[in-house]
């Protein structure tokens, strides 16, 4: 019964309750309750056996820089758009990493920005910026009409 109540509390909060210890999670998790060992693969390892993605959504509870550090081939060769929830503590490191790979930052509503100023952002490869901006504008116009 205690396990069911704990699961129900987690669902009611709508927040993550798991994180990598090295990434420290976030302050809303309530600390470490138990350890579980799980296999982890880098994005580049997944790329070896999966189709090349056009978009990657990441919400990894503070492990953004760690995950992106295992995505060199993805960032350099495939160059998908990333939609990432970036923890405040990691913003500078993630921004530097993505800038070094020639990715540009867009807000969650598709506006070009100079830095990460909100939790959820798009990272768009420089060669796809014009296409992305046009699609974002088209979507905004459609939403205004509704």
Image (cartoon, rainbow, N blue to C red):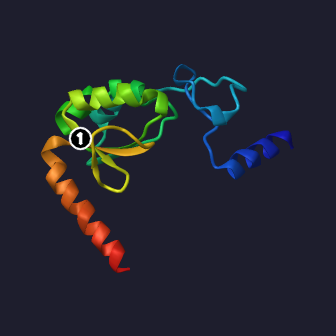
Residue at the (24%, 33%) spot, across then down: 75
Horizontal and vertical percent position of residue 102: 18, 34
Image-quadrant location for residue 65: top left
Residue at the (38%, 52%) spot, across then down: 108
The residue carrying mark 1 is 104
Residue at the (23%, 41%) spot, across then down: 104
Residue at the (62%, 44%) spot, across then down: 15
Q: Secondary structure at mark 1?
A: strand
Left or right of 13? Residue 48 is left
Horizontal and vertical percent position of residue 131: 16, 56
Residue 42 visible = no
Q: Quadrant of the C terminus?
A: bottom left
Q: Quadrant of the N terminus?
A: top right
Horizontal and vertical percent position of residue 18: 61, 34
Image-quadrant location for residue 133: bottom left
Viewer-closest of 115 and 34: 115
Left or right of 16? Residue 140 is left
Q: Is residue 141 above or below residue 108?
A: below
Left or right of 46? Residue 128 is left
The residue at the far right in this view is: 1
Viewer-closest of 16 and 51: 16
């Amino acid at each position: 019964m205690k396990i069911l109540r704990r699961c129900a509390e987690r669902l009611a909060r709508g927040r993550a309750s798991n994180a990598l210890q090295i990434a420290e999670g976030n302050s809303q998790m309530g600390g470490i309750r138990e350890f579980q060992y799980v296999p982890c693969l880098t994005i580049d390892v997944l790329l070896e056996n999966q189709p090349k993605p056009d978009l990657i959504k990441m919400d990894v509870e503070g492990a953004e820089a760690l995950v992106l550090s295992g995505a060199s081939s993805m960032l350099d060769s495939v160059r998908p758009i990333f939609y990432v929830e970036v923890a405040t503590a990691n913003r500078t490191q993630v921004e530097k990493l993505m800038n070094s790979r020639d990715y540009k930052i867009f807000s969650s509503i598709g506006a070009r920005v100079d830095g990460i100023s909100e939790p959820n952002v798009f990272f768009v490869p420089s060669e796809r910026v014009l296409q992305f901006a046009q699609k974002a504008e088209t979507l905004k116009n459609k939403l205004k009409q509704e």
